[in-house]
Amino acid sequence: MRTPNLARPAGRIITVTKLARCLWCGDVLPRPTGVGRPRIYCRRSHRQRHYEARRLASVQGLRDDEVLLTRKVIEEWRDQIYILEAAIEDAERDLEGKPSLRDYTEAFQHLYEAARGVRSFRIEPKAMGGE
Ligand SMILES: [Zn+2]
């Protein structure tokens, strides 16, 4: 499934493709091949974990829009957010005035390094309502 092309200020076009993702971990699923129902989990164990999380949500009385996370997951996520916020503030400060191409390049590299940790970060709840 594709979403519309987005025009960038420089005039180049980027295409945003909405990828099917695992209902449990959010990893991108392989493109469907042949017939049959499209996959909704990247592996069988994630189907099982999702089932257990929904079951625990039911036992805990969670609503459809609620999830239960461990303190460790929340703290790790907050750390990631903090790293990104700090990098954005650094970049904004470094690009004040009349920044050069080198300033932009260094700001990008700094932001990229800060964002890298998000790529492999996965949030797995203990319990998940709904679905
Ligand atoms: Zn998965």
Image (cartoon, rainbow, N blue to C red):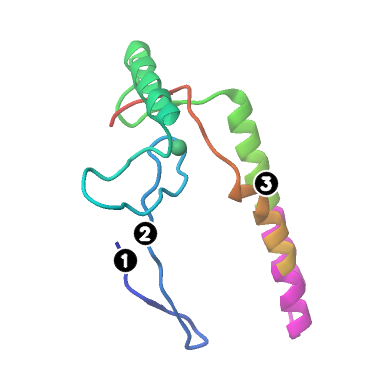
Task: Verify whether residue 3 appears in magenta.
Answer: no
Span shown in magenta: 86-108
Question: Does the CB distance between marks 2 and 1 fall below 8 Å?
Answer: yes
Question: Does the CB distance between marks 3 and 2 fall below 8 Å?
Answer: no
> Which numbered disc flags the more N-terminal residue, 3 or 1?
1
Residue with the mark numbered 1: 2
Percent from the top left, x then y, of residue 72?
63, 26
Percent from the top left, x then y, of residue 35?
21, 49
Is residue 89 toward the left or the right of residue 60 in the image? right
Residue 18 numbered tag = 2
Task: Verify whether residue 96 appears in magenta.
Answer: yes
Percent from the top left, x then y, of residue 26?
45, 43
Question: Measuring 31% from the left and 52% from the top, which residue is drawn there?
Answer: 32
> Which numbered disc flags the more N-terminal residue, 2 or 1?
1
Task: Label 1: state its secondary structure.
Answer: loop
Is residue 109 toward the left or the right of residue 5 in the image? right
